[in-house]
Image (spheres, coloured by chain):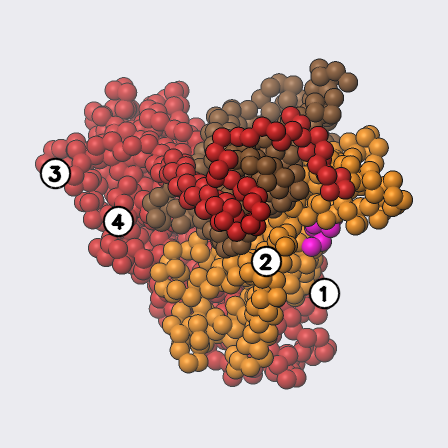
Chain colours: A red, B orange, C brown
Amino acid sequence: MPKACFINGSVKGHDFSRAEKGQQDCGVLTPEGFGPTLEATYETRSRQLRSSCVLAGLMALFAVVAPGQAAPRRPGELAWAIHYDPKTFDPAKVDEQASELVRYLTGGVLLRINRQTQEPEPQLAESYQVSLKGTLIVFKLRSGLRFSDGTSLTSADVAWSLRRVLAPSTQGVVAEEFLSPSEVVVETPDPLTVTIHLPKAVTGVGKIFDEIAIEPANRPSEGRVTSGPFTVSDYKRGQYVRLSRNPNYWRRDSAGTQLPYATGVRLDVLNNREQEISLFLRGEYDLIDSLSPDYFAIVAQKSPQSVHDLGASLNTEQLWFNQFSAAPLPEFEKAWLQNRNFRIAVSDAIHRADLARIAYNGHATPAFGFISPANKLWYNNDLKYPHESVADANRMLAASGFHRNENQLYDATGHPVRFSILTNSGNAARQKMAAMIQQDLAAIGMQVTIVDLDFPALIERLLHKQDYEACLLGLSNVEPDPNEMMNLWLSSSPNHQWNPSEKTPATAWEAEIDKQMQLQASSSSEQVRKLAVDRVQQIVADQQPFIYLVYPNALQAISPQLQGVKAAILSPGPAWNIDFISRKDGAR
Amino acid sequence: MKKHIAAAVLLLLILGAALVLWLSPYNYAFQDRDAIMAPSTAQHWTGTDELGRDRTVRVAAALLIGLTGATAAAVITIMIAASFGLLAAYSPPAVAAILMFVSDGFLSLPWLFLLMMARSLLPLTASPLQTAVTTFLVLAAFGWPACARAIYRGAAQFRTAEWMIQGHACGLKTRQLVRLHLVPHLRPLLLPQFLICVPAFIVAEANLGALGLGVGEPMPSWGAMLLELENSALLARSQWVYLPIALLVVVLLILESFTTEIEY
Amino acid sequence: MHLPMIVLARVGRTLLLMLFAAAGTILLVRFAPGYFTDYREMDTKYTQAAQAEIQADAAQQQSAGQIAMRMVKSWLNGDLGQSRQYGVPVAELIGARLQVSALLLVRGILWGWLLAICTALPISGMRKGGVLWGLPFTVLLAIPTAAMATACILAEVGGPVLVLSLIVAAREFKFLRNLLEGAWRSPHLLQGRAQGLSPRALVTMHILPNVAPQLRALATLSIVTALGALVPIEVIFTVPGVGQLAWSAVMNRDLPVLVAVSLLMTAVVGFAGMLSSRAVTLEEA
């Protein structure tokens, strides 16, 4: 292909002798000048542009691919989204929430906690008895139980499943609930009886056995052969998990119809909230378990009967200061963070009602303690806590030697009070709260920097290096029983966020918390336990190691096409009575 | 758009933004908590955002910060890319191969992790301005490899063009040839890259907010305002959410007018 | 230099680049904040289990050297290592997703280029109004990729290919228009027009051949652009491709997956660079 070269105004190396077809449409130079020829060229080019635009538009249409659904829905199948792939389908090794959901939907259990009444209900076990000391449990199984593959379910399968969960090699999280799993003895006097000898009494027996799925002895199948309502029938990583109805499920409704009503469940792996909502509004998803407050109004506008605000959940959002004595912080800063008056002043200055109204669009409740009012059994109705008051905040700070100079607060040694609040990126409500707290604390002279980090970097700073000043995060309380929070409140625990893994309690009030939590863990008297937990709540309100901000409300979206749903805030949310849920237009 | 009109519009935008900041009774951080996502009023010309902050003031501040940062970063990145590409074009083949190898290597590495390390080295109490400057510098430092190869190819091609040979024969030194003849011929590659970098850096700054970099609260971030376009809940509540992108389009058109090659 | 030798040299270069990318990725990821962490540590129920796993992991992967040795062994095994987040061979993870991403990339780049060329050619030849005619592409440049993708989802129109095409087209349009503007106004083009050549002849015989080397270099650039846009597009549209896997790997510090993705990206960039270099070399030969 010859190239044209231009040197000193001449054209070299190109043959212009051949005229191409259509030259009358081109810019031919005439003695009159450029006018008509350039107009012709412009007209040509405009036609070309128009045709190019049409062609481009057509190509854009060809490039259209409708946003995909992972797999078409089967008749009678329920569908909703989970936000990440389950790590395992082995019910004994569940250690995160997506796997827990699959276990809940597929695993047959001896007892199930009714998520509304919070009382254990017999499932595979027809009845059970716990001895007075709490060290002997006897389960009587229903007769005629079968696994999904048709094989019989007997006490041997129950014993095998329990022993597998307790075995150190399984590293099952549930085993820890037994306190000394290696000392637990499981016996099967007959095919329908299981006796369990515990070395120590455990609290929340019903809750523990809610999490142990019974599998065929010596045939672990990772959810493919189950005794629960569904079995895992298909899994495409990053796309979906498909569950199919267990044809041999033991349960029937009052009319004798076999349960579950739904023919199956499809859990799409979808981490995009916009897409989840779009698919829900299109009817491709049946429910959204934790609807973001930002999107509540959007869904309510388009489908008012779908949205449900169940009031305060069990979860909390809190701010806390790093009180670890060996933290890599200047000593004067540690002095602030370990100062009770400083923490109370911060708590007093924060307008919690604004946080609930603005950050959560009204779908949150101001919080002052770690037990949500939704947890009626354990909430301390007589809790005394500091109230919002900038004047009180200033008084508390003055009492500890802080003073103001214009808009800046200084400590007794003359250091300006400036610190950072870490939080995780990707949570819009939390980021709004952080910005609001920044303004609230500016009113008492504290200059706060907000730092958003991705979760791994945040965890490293918080739990491994303790290299932070303050942190704003939430706590998901899946269980109402405060015994589940032992890891949070025991000073020796690595999850004792403000001062983890203490060899001995650093303060008298932390020692008191340890004592009360251990009392409630070991007592079999509900009254004693309640008093102990009340005491812990009061200590926390007095000392503010966690400055509780709000209890986010439980927001759910449930398709009007669904029937049988009973609202509950405990995990797994609206799907808790999955046996009775079905689509109005679906097969049963 | 003619260049002088474009310059006037840009100046008007910048002066307007500065005036808004200077004259407004609200600063960009003040939260009017009784006026959340408020519509346009006499007090708040373009309404307020989700925290009751005056949108006009915040957009004005974001425009000044974002425009300065992104334009400066784009200029730096283009200069680095051009230097790299020209150096490779004028080096012996072995050296050019090494330079292009380094450039491709830069493209292949997950620099996100280096950015995380950069954040961990910054003090937690670094001011929003400090993190913003760091972010734009980092973007400038890592934005060049994509264009360097194209510049190298272009420069290598033009280096042996007859007009370059003629210039050399006329006694021009290499530096003069590069500055006076070669770089102007590379403008079709450099200028579009500059135009692409500006909005890319504005958005990248907001995305880096997830790693603790970017413009921190309460300072407004133009990129973060653009990312609000992803949020259907916000789009439904206020039309003023489109203001930052409208301004960005105007700014890009203005920059494009400056960088357009046509001259008669 | 003979063609086989050229190709061999280029392939060798790409392999060296891949080695460099693997080493760099191991260093960067290993020493970035959050490597020895697990999000389950924040869950009081699963903290101990998570920490036990982390300690076991840390014992085996303290130094970059140890990690590199394990990587090399896994490459020799062919499974490319075990994914930290999924616990399955990386080769199995990536293999399933490669075709999805490759198809998306190819279609996105091709459509994007077609759109850019079809619009840049006539617009570049206009005397006035070129900037305004190019306004749609300026608007596309201004819209973040994620916002564009979300808009498609909300409007229930378009999909990942459309978004990728538009992104590629918006960027390539700017380059192409400037290149072609210069080409339209070069003296030999004026001469050709004066001699009566049709626009089609001018384009096919003079403009495109002259800008072909820059176009090839731009092709490499557009592959890089498309690779960069792949991650947000796949994440937002939930396309089960390599981009989605890469993002999840970044969030979970899944080093074996990240190394594999880096290798893949390097291979693609190296191959693209090889193609553009090879074409130039052939012309020079």
Chain of the residue where label 2 is placed in the rendered structure: B
Residue furthest left in the image:
A255
Name the residue tied to disc 2: B257
User: Closer to the camera: disc 2 or disc 1?
Assistant: 2
Q: Is residue C56 left or right of residue C142?
A: right
User: Which of these two is toward me, A308 or B96?
Assistant: B96
Which residue is at 49% across, 59% downward?
B245
Task: Please state the extent of the stretch shown in magenta in the rendering.
Answer: B75-80
Identified by mark 4, the residue type is: Ile
The tag on residue A330 is: 1
Distance in Å between CA atoms under marks 4 and 2? 52 Å
Q: Main secondary structure of the magenta part?
A: helix
Element type at marker 3? loop
Number of labelled discs?
Answer: 4
Amino acid type at circle 1 is: Pro
Counting residues from the N terminus, which is met first, the one under dot 4 or under dot 1? 1
Mark 3 touching mark 1, by CB under 8 A? Answer: no
Q: Is residue A569 left or right of residue C218?
A: left
Q: Is residue C93 in view?
A: no
B109 to the left or right of A373: right
Task: Kindly identify which residue carries mark 4.
Answer: A558
Chain containing the residue with disc 3: A
Q: Nearer the viewer, mark 4 or mark 2?
A: 2
